[in-house]
Every structure is written in structure tokens, then in C-alpha cells.
Image: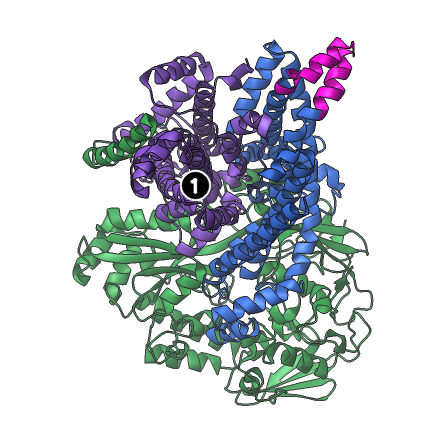
Amino acid sequence: MTRSKAGLAAVAVTAAASLVLAGCAQQSNSGPPAGSGAQPAVGFPETPPNPEVPGGKPGGVFRLGITEPTAIDPYNTQESEGQGVEDSLFTGLLEVTPDGEPVPGVATDWSPNDTCDTWTFNLKPGTKFHNGEIVDAAAFKRGWERASIKDSGSEVSYHLDVIKGYDEISSGAATEMSGVNASNPNQLVVTLKNADCEFPLRTIHPVAAPMPVAAGPTSNTAFNDAPIGNGPFKMDGKWNHDQGIRLVRFDDYTAGPKAFLDAIEFTIVSPSNGVQLEYDGFVNGTFDWARMPAPLIAQNRSTYEPQGKWISRKTNATNYFVTGDTTAPLNSVDARKAVSMAIDRNAIAQGVFKGAQVPATSMIPAAFRDVYQEGVCDACTFNLDEAKKLAEKAGLKPGTEINLFYNTGAGHEEWTAAVRQQLEKNLGLVVKYSGVPFNDHLNNLEAPTMSGLNRLAWSADYPTPGNFMIPLMATSSMKLDAQGNVKGNNYSRYSNPEFDALVLKASATKDEAERSKLWQQAEQMSIGRDLALMPMFQRQQFRLVATDRFANINMDFSENPTFDKIFLK
Amino acid sequence: MSSLPPTSGESEAVGTSDPVRSSGSADSARSASAVDAKLPKRRRSGSPGQFRDIWNRYRRNKLALVGTFIVGLLVFLAIFEPILTPFDPFEQNLLNTTAPPDSRHFFGTDVLGRDMFSAIIYGAKLAVIVGVVTVLMSLLVGVVFGAIAGFRGKFWDTLIMRLTDIFLAFPLIIGAILVVRTFGAGITPVIIALVVFGWATTARLMRGQTLALRESEYVEAARSIGASDGRIILRHIMPNAIAPVLVYAFTNIGVVVVAMASLSFLGVGVPANVPEWGRMLSQAYGFIKVPGQSHLWAFPALAICITTLGFAFVADGLRDALDPKLRGGN
Amino acid sequence: MGKFILRRVGQAVIVVLAAILLVYVATYALGDPFASTGDRQVPPEIAAQNRAIFGLDQPLPIQYINYIGNLVTGDLGLDFDQRRPVIDMLGAVVPNTARLALVAILIDVAIGVIAGIIAAVKRYSFADVLVTVVSTVAIGVPTFVIGLGLLAFLSGVGPFPVVPRSFTDQVPWYQEVLLPAFALAIIDAAFVARLMRGSMLEVLRADYIRTARAKGVSERRVIGVHALRNSIIPVVTYVGVSLGTLLGGAIITEAIFQYDGVGYLLFRAIGSNNAPVISAVIVFGVIAYTVLSLIVDILYAFLDPRIRLN
């Protein structure tokens, strides 16, 4: 009895004491530790691609860890892990090189009409699915319709929405996709809703894979777990959920050069400590390709880079803040630039990410080598004096409230907390800092009240910079509903007719070099001048690879090994 | 009636260990099922001489004294947290992240350069506050329902006992996850969750006590002179029934501390920036095999262990002191 | 006796039905389970379509009735993430959890019973004090701290695999189960040791033991047969309930060791807000616990007739 009274008293006293004692003198926790030198330079350099060596004979088993994919059936393949498997099982019309260049897959060549709204793909005749079925134009039509049809449950079929007839089939009004003509088995003719001179790039997405008759509808779970594709590898048994996936070489592959590896073994690891497991597995010889925990990157680089077992590449994604461009306090360019310049990205990259991510100075990532403009965002560099000046000009006084929202459970807790402290210290802003599950985060973004800074990341679904520019910043991507909610991806509500005209022109430009120039202009305008979004970090990936056992290992566009090229030394 | 049947003759053994069991076992914190079995025959407590006897017995138990010291230390840390922390536990220093312990940062710094020593002390405050508040609230709910069930009997008894069956059928952690996910993360939802799945044991204990007392002579006497039910419960039954319930409640603080840490460890507890021990452990999970970074998980793990051990020792001591028969069976 | 069993079964059914309602409301009241994983963005039209496919556009009571109806026929619906039948996902992991639970119980009974007997028979000896102190300490250390410690220091050492279930290290199941089973067993073993000690001390004072000794039965036989048989009853009931708990999934231990069981399934389902899996696993856990408790109660009533009168 007395015990419990003591307990009650303890709570009361604690509460009271905390109030009284709060604000007592504590040391200031800042500055580098005593005796340490200057901070090392931020980030780790990229490694050049491993040169392709000729030769190689069949053999070898390549082993790696992945987290459980959402799907390996193309109708719903979404993340990098799923794409690694899907890519080996299926060959689309086009394939993509590690540098993001399109190369022939099943199609030998492709060409548009003058207005870029009809595309003709000529197919290699007689290539086969793993069950012996022939891959013809109808197989592509079948695959696209299977994914787009109402009730397919696909979360990625919207990548095909530029094709005529997509709306009808996905709403259930039609059972066929009228824009796809497969009457000639070796020629696929696609009619689009609007001109798109980059349409072939879209077909690189898994959802555009061909399907054999044996696939059946997307509800066919037997096929979901053991897809019959037309790629250089085929399933060995079915997907053993949460355990592993084993692929073996498809010896009748004729859509391209045959693979060398006998098999690929994907061991499925936990998302929570999979990185550590992959690393441990690489060190003890269980895996031939592995990620590593961020604190170990520097040490491993010095160990493995001299041995040639180290891959470091900037990849196709940018981590950024969606800014409320039409709501206070970030509804002026000066305010956005002030906030952006008050954030020390280098300190975060070094202190929190330990160099695993690099500060972004552009929205279009370095993976797009032709279009990448380093430093196009001049406000992405830490500059406290300038930040304070701009803040004053924009009326961003100390004490101004600003939202800083992020989604929980995806590793953003730490670095966003660092941004919060910087804004409070550097500009005296009052940061309303809140993490919510991703669906709530999206709801926040869609609402007309959205303001301040909201974390998001974007990676291109197919290798075109337009996939960064148009969905994120074009007026047409706002898609406001009756309540004023954003239903597209332009959550910032950036709306600039000049920019809209520019991206439209780029999409309708056939010449690649000229198109690249237009994309660059669009970025200079939207990011450089207007800071419509706030680029934060550029994704960089590091891998340990068993180059002592295998030749020709490189990282492909979706961050997976180039399985079809690798051979045993 | 109860999930684990009364073990009559052997009841002491079950009774002794059971509440403590859960203090350590987060996965199977479902202790309570057997507790009500042991208590109905508990003697009335109250006279000063008896308290002295209890204290004399308690003090002979060395582990219990260690436990008392630990609990005292926790309360001390909780109260004086603001002056004991050398740094603001929330303040980051990106120039000095994941630094190993040194003379400035006794426990090193975490992934954002926050001082771990200050964070551990802040965590102690959180643990004490959440532990005590949760237990008090469970007590309130449990005692009221238990007294009603035991005193009114029949319909009320059946209804409340079935209710406790339902809540006891959920493992504490899993039940709490359900609640926290419904109400959102934060300290208040965690407390609510732990109360929702924590009151049932107290209710059963209280019911057992009340049942035994209901038929006692002095309650009969009170009834015969026309005292109301409420008065009988409050004035006659409660004071005599409450002691073992309180002892159980106190020992349960350890369970609550582990449960909160477990929830945070699973990512469904307190917000990410709050220096809570389980949260710190989950942040350190990815560093568990990184050489030179063991301070990230070793200190919070140690803090949790010491806390639960402290409460477990005190619990053991209290039980032994209350029921000398248990020590050696003489 | 029949009446007692009937009453207990009736109670168990009510508990399970009410628990399912609780779970259902809590999981499905969470809101839109689509569009909720990581950085994945699902256009609202598609999310709406999916809601319709899964019947989430109907009122909650109708959804609940459908759910119970399907549950009875063994249909737990499709999971939101990969569209696999939830019953298959559960079916794949239940055997693993059962193995883990059984091995853990085996370990804790073996250690606990032996330690408890020694402590009781050699009362006040060094061994007794040791058992008492070690068990007190072990009970106070949270399972997940034990688990993290074992993982940090022992995985990759000796028979314990670095990467569970990789193609290269195809370790047999008993090798994979060892570490998590130890993590789970330590606390229970401490518990069983205390139970065993207390219960054995009680029995050793009984008249029939004195009689047996007086008749000249060997001490070994007195302890090993007469006393053990009677003192193990509380251990059996404890272990029975403990098994029920473990079958429901040791979420933290399984998550730490990535052990492919019910708890790990739940852990991942929580991360992706996968409502059908969350509710299925919790319902399974409640049923497992309730059924095991029921069995223990009935068994106990057979062993000890006094209970039936209660």
C-alpha cells in the first residue's frame, strides 16, 4: 500500500521536478570530437563499369540475397528486387544497358510515324517461351491486356496508360486494348493517345512483358509463383516464399546471346537486417554479390576496391522534399531557397549516412549521363548568410511555423530529424515534425492544406528524364479533384505554362540530342530558377562482388547484377 | 474458470513465480492466468506488528535489497533527470555521430550524435513514468471490476470473468500492437494498450480476495446493520483485500517496462526521436555486428536488464516476506 | 465430468468468437490498407479498384459476417501485398513455429526439471543457491535482450548459420531452430526450475514419501519415481499453457532471428499494414492458446478431481 503511494508521489514529483528543472544548464553538444581533424570529403567516388571481357563458357551458380519481392509475375513487379528476377525471366521489346541506353530485346528495331503517336516494332521471329510457345506480337498484346484489364489488381499497369484503349479496358468497358495491333505475328503496331517520342522506353518496364497463353489471368497463383517467361533464365521449381528463388539457364534462348550461368540463387533475407546478412554472407562465401551496412562502407572500400571487388554507382533515384509551392510559408521562391540553403546536406550525408548517400544538386540524377547537370540547383548548397538574407526578404522570420513530414518505417527518421534541428538552429523556425505511415503521408500530400517540407523519393520507371520532369512538376500531373486534392504526382502544385510548353516540346522531339537539351532547360527553369521541389540526396549504391570467381559483373539500371553477361572464371 | 487451473496443494509454487515470469518474458507475457489461484486464503494484513515482521523478513533477502536499491535509483534518475543529464538528450551533433564512449560522452553518441548517457537517463524517466501510470490505471480498472465481480456474483461475475478470459487470451505484446496501431504511435497509446491488456489479472486477483471476504463474519455484520453495498466494498472489503493486489501491481511494473521496450523495438511504440530504451535498441539492431559500435546496443540493453532485474528482485522479496511458508516450507 | 468439459468448451468458443471480433475491428478499422508500403505510389483509382476486389467497400458488419463465414470454411482471404491465400502463408509457417515451440519446451523442461530436482533434494547446498540465484536473474532478463545477445555473439559460430536458409548453407531445421529456441527457453527453464523445486519440496514432506522411505525403498527410487510423479503436475500444466503461447508466435524472438514462423509473419505483416495476415495470425494465436488451455484444464480435472467441484 505504501509502495503504491510512493509510486503515485514519484509520478507527481517527477512531473513537477521536470518542469522546475527544465532549462537547467547542460553542456552544448556540438563541434567535432576533440583531437579529430577536419571532416573527410563527403561521399565515395563511383567506380568505372567493369570492362566486358569476351569468351566464357556455360557454368557456375551466382548467389545473392534479396528481400521478399512483391511479385515476380510482370503484371505487378515493382521494386528492384522483383525486377532482378523478372528481368532474368522475361525479355521485353527493348532492354536497357547499365547506362540506361535502350538496346534491342525481342524487337529488332522500332520507329514512329511523323507525329510520334503510332509506333511500329519489328520482332525477331521464332523466339520462344520457356514452355516452347512462340513469342509473337500477340504475346505482347496478351501481356499488356492481362495487366491492364479491370480486376487484374495490377499496381503498375498505369505505365501503359498512354496507349489508346487503355482507359476502356481498365474500366471494364472493353476486353481488348484497341491501340495495340498484333495482326502480323512479327510486327507490333501501337497507337498512342498523344504524341510520345519516348514511348519505346516505357516498354522497358516489366509490365510490358509478353505473356504465353499458359499464363492465364493474373489470379492464376501457380503462374504468379512460377512465371513462364521468354528470358535467358527460367524458374527452377516455384518461388519458395520467404526462402528463396532459383533460376536456371534457358538453353533455347534466341532473343539475344545465351546466358552463361547454370543458375542464379536468390536467398530471401529479412528487410530489417538483410543488409547485414548479405554482408556476412559475402564475407563467409555464401553470396557473390552483397550490400553492406552503412558504417562499414569506408572500411570495406579500402579492403575490396584494390582487389576489384567493389562497385560504387550513382543510380536512378533522388530523395527530395515536396514543398508546398502555393501555401505559406514556402509559397515564394525566396522562402524555398532560404530553407534549402539553411540545410547542410554535406553534414547529414557524412554524419548520418556515413557517405552512403550524396547531397543532390539536381533533380535528375547522375544515372542519366546525357542530361545530368551537377549544380543546377544553386540553392542546394549550404550558405547560411545567403539563407538568412533570403529569409528576411521572404518574410520568413524566426518563430515562423513550418511543417516537416516524413513517412515512418522506411529509414527516414534520422536524417529528417537532422534537418529539423538545422532549420531550428539556423533560421529559428519552429518546425512541426511528424512521421506518419505512408498512406497517411500521401493523404497529407494530396490535401489542399499541404504545406512546408514533405519527404518523398522518386526513381524513374524507365530511363528517361521526362519521367522526373513531367509527373512531378507539370500542371497536367496535378489532376485536381472536386475537393482540390492532388490526384497526380505533382504534389507541390507547381504550375508554370512556360515549363509545361517546354516538356511537351521535349516529348514530341524526335532528335535525341535536341530532346536532352530541352530536358536540361526544363530543369534549369523548374529547379534552378524556381526550386519547385527541393532535391536532398542522390541515391548511390555500393556492392561487394566476387570478381575472383566471376567475370563481367556490373550493376544494371535497376541496381541488380547483369546476370545474362556474367560467367565463371 | 481460469485458464490454468488452481493447483491447490501446490499452489504456492505456481503463485510464487508466475507474476515474475512475465517480467522477463516479453514474448509470453501472459503470466496472470494462474495468479488468482494462489490468493484466496491470504491472511488479512494491516496491523503494524505485521508490517514490521514483513520488513524484517524482507530485509534478510539480499537480492531484494539490491532490487530496492535499483528501483530507488530509477526513481532518483527519473526525478532528477534534467540535472543529471550532461547534455540535452534530444540535441544532435552531426560532426560526432556513433562515437564510442569517451570522457565527454560516457556512453558514446548515437546515429545522430546525441549523447547516449543522457538518453539512457531520459529513458529511465520514461520507463518509470509509463510503468507507474500504467500500473495505477490497470489497478483502478481491475480493482473496480474485480470487486464488482466478487461481491455481486452471478451475472456480473460471469460477465466480467468471461471478459478477462478474452483479454487474457491475447499475448500482452500482440494485444498491445493491435491497440497502438489503432490509436497511432505515442506514449499515451502505449499506456492505453498496456492497460487494456493488463487490467484482467488484477481484476481476477481482486475478485478472488473479495469472494473470500464476502462471507466473512464482519462483512455479514456490516450487512446486518444495513450498510450499503458500496460502503461494504469500500470500507470493509477493499482495505483487507487490497494488499496482495498491490504487491502484484508493483511487481508488474517490470512487465510494463519490458512491454513498452518491446513495442518500441518492433517499431510500434513511442515516436522515433524519443530516447526510449527499446527504440534505441531497434536503431542499433543494424549495427549489432559492426565492430566498435557495440555501445549503441549494449547500454540500452543493460539498462532494460537492470531495471527488470530490480523489479523482479523486489517482487521476489515481497512475496517471500508476505508468505514465509514459501521460502523453505517449514 | 462431461458437464465440466462441456462448460469449458462453451467458454472457450465464446472467448474465441469475441477475440475475433476484437481483432477484426482493430485491424480493419485501420483504414486503407492499400498504398501503404514504403515508397510505392498507387494511383487512387487503382487503390479503389483493389478495395472493391477485397470487399472493403462494404459496411463493416457485412465484412465481419463474411469474414467469419469464410473463416469457418478455412478461407482467410488473400493478403494485400502479394495476393497469396492467407491460409497458405499461415500453413507454411505453422510447422516451423511448432518445431520451435517444441524444441524450446524440450530444452526448458530438461534444464528446469533437473535443476529443480537437484535444488530441492540438496536443499540449502551450493547447488540450491546457484539454481535460485541463476533462475532469479534469468527470469529478469527480457527475451529480446537474450535474443539480441545470442545473435550478436553466436550466429555464425559453430553450428549456428550466418544466413538462415541460404542455398549454400542448407542447414537442417534442428540447426536453425537452436538459437531462437535457446532464447525462448532460458526464461521458461528458470521458471520450471523454480516450480519444480517448490513442488518437489512440498511432495517430499508428504506422508507417503515418509512411508516409502520407512519401507526401505531406495532414495533414488523415492525421488525418481514417487516424488517426481507427483511433483511434476504443476510443471506439466505450466508447460501446456506455455506451449499455447509459443504456438501463437514468439514475435520478437522470431523477428530477431528471422525465423520463418508465425511471429515473423506477423512482424512483416505489421510493417506493410497487411490487415488480412495480421488478423489471421492473431486469431490463430488466440485459438492456439485457448485450445491448449482447455486441454490443460481438462487433463488437470482428470488428474485432480477436486477441480471439478470448483
Viewer-nearest residue: C8 or B197: C8
Q: Secondary structure at mark 1?
A: helix
Query: From which residue to which does the magenta span run?
Result: C202-229
Residue lying furthest front: B224
Give the side of residue A289 with respect to residue A386, left or right.
right
- Image coordinates of residue B44 in percent, x first then y, are 39, 25
Q: Of the residues shown, which amino acid type is indicated by label 1?
A: Gly
Determine which quarter of the picture holds residue A455. Answer: bottom left
- C161 vs A433: above or below: above
Q: Measuring 36% from the left and 34% from the top, which residue is drawn there?
A: B219
Residue holding disc 1: B150
Above or below residue B263? Residue A255 is: below
Instruction: Please tell me whether the stretch drawn in magenta is mainly helix, strand or loop.
Output: helix
Position above or below: B223 against A85: above
**Figure disc tally:** 1
Chain letter, colour green in render: A
Mark 1: few, some, or many residues within 10 Å (few <14, many ≥20)? Answer: many
- Is C215 colored magenta in this rendering? yes
* Residue A238 percent coordinates (x, y): 75, 60
Q: Chain of mark 1?
A: B
Q: Quadrant of the N terminus of chain B?
A: top right
Q: Which chain is blue?
A: C
Q: Which chain is purple?
A: B
Estimate the x, y position of residue A323 in percent, counting from the top left: 33, 64
The C terminus of chain B: image quadrant = top right
Is residue A228 visible in the rendered structure shown here?
yes
Left or right position of B65 against A154:
left
Q: Position of residue A374 (x, y in %)?
A: 41, 60
Does residue A48 appear in the picture of this structure? no
